[in-house]
Amino acid sequence: MSTKEKEKAVPSISTTIAGIPLETCVYNASGPRTGTYSAMNKIALSRSGAVLSKSATSNSQTGNPLPRTWHDRSKQRCASLNSEGLPNAGIDYYISNETISESVGETGKPYMISISGYSLIDNLQMIEKIRSAIIDKGAKIAALELNLACPNVIGKPIIGYDFSQMEHVLDTICHLPCIENSEIKVLGVKLPPYFDGPHFEAASQIVNKHKGLIKFVATINTIGNALAIDTNAEMPMISSNGGFAGLSGPAVKYTALANVRRMRELLDPSISVVGVGGVKDGSDVFEMILCGASAVQVGTCHWIEGPTCFDRICAELQSIMKEKGYKSIDDFKGKLKSWSKEGAAASREVKKVTETCLTPIRNSTNDVNLKQERDLLIYVSAFLMAVVAFLLVDKFHFI
């Protein structure tokens, strides 16, 4: 391949999760902009590698009272809160052939269903409906993501923090004939964020008991029980649950990276890790994959920016890979290096070179801004002089 051909070569960001091929390794998290097939179709038409539904409950529900979301509007835009309470159209809607067909359209992208029952019985009943939709009605459902991590259902605990309950739930579900016989071909589990070493180990041991049946783990969901205050009104920003809500956005990325890294280290190699939490650009995706993620979900950024975020993020990831000489995500997936003096020195050198290259651009930009401000001042001054002249003519009848 010639130098020009190498320069034109676009790195592949395709991946597989439990044997499911994805054109890109980036797709939507369950939650924002996934409640209807029209919203999901917009995801399918973007560069998102798959379409994941809203977390479904047994019946449709409206969720918690409004306002139930909040976005940091400062320059940093570092955080969002939500206490939605799983508003959704109900399991029957998300597994219907009409919804799946309208969501995916002609893209042929994998359609995945997320469920979050109020009880084990709820989840078992929904899983049976999914089985029936696939086997009896030919529904093209590529995977089931079992949400054990929602912190925003008032009065309901996060199952992923109650390890005895989590073990019972997964033991029961993984012994269902439709799971053991692969009528539902791919089962994944969405986990809450963990913060302590023994908790990582406990959760991974429970999941590893069912290797071969549980095919992927998505980590993390929102960090529960965050609180944002309206200082003008001296009250919470969110009305329900005393203002306590799930924290998401860039602020949680570092916790998410740690969870992806530890889960990849502790889980059986047959179980894929899907990273989620605080992803806003291609660099964040690169870091997730470097920590061991096979794919990366985007939630809050999709919520704020809309599905065009997938196009931008995929392009940014490919740009980073091209700059580093990576042809596919397998070239760097899970290959996070240990800290070293040599690595730190090389990083400082890259930053120094980057800063040197950017300085003239910044100076040029500043010069352009100064010129624009000067021109604006001239225009404003001329306008004011014209106004004064008009007033003088009107007052003194100058001709």
Image (spheres, rainbow, N blue to C red):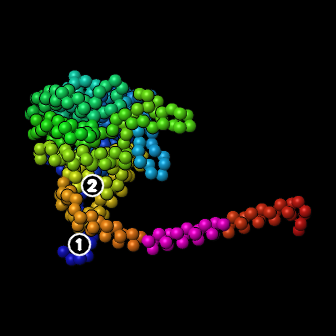
Residue for point 77% across, 65% down? 386
x and y percentages locating residue 256 in the rendered image:
28, 46
The numbered disc on residue 105 is none
What residue is drawn where x is 31% and y is 57%? Answer: 283
Residue type at mark 1 is Lys
Q: Is residue 314 above or below residue 225?
A: below
> Which amino acid is tagged 2?
Glu
- Taking the spot 22% from the left edge, 59% from the top edge, the residue there is 339
Residue 260 visible in rendering: yes
Q: Position of residue 228 (x, y in %)?
A: 45, 37
Residue 216 position, x and y percent, is 18, 42
| Residue that mark 1 sits on | 6
**Circle 1/circle 2 CB separation < 8 Å:** no
Say few, some or many: other residues with alpha carbon within 10 Å of mark 1 (under 14 / 14 to 19 / 20 or more): few
The boundaries of the magenta stretch are 359-377
In the picture, measured across the screen, residue 103 lies left or right of residue 78, that is left
User: Does the segment drawn in magenta span residue 299?
Assistant: no
> Of circles 1 and 2, which is in front?
2
Task: From the image, give the main secondary structure of the stretch colored magenta.
Answer: helix
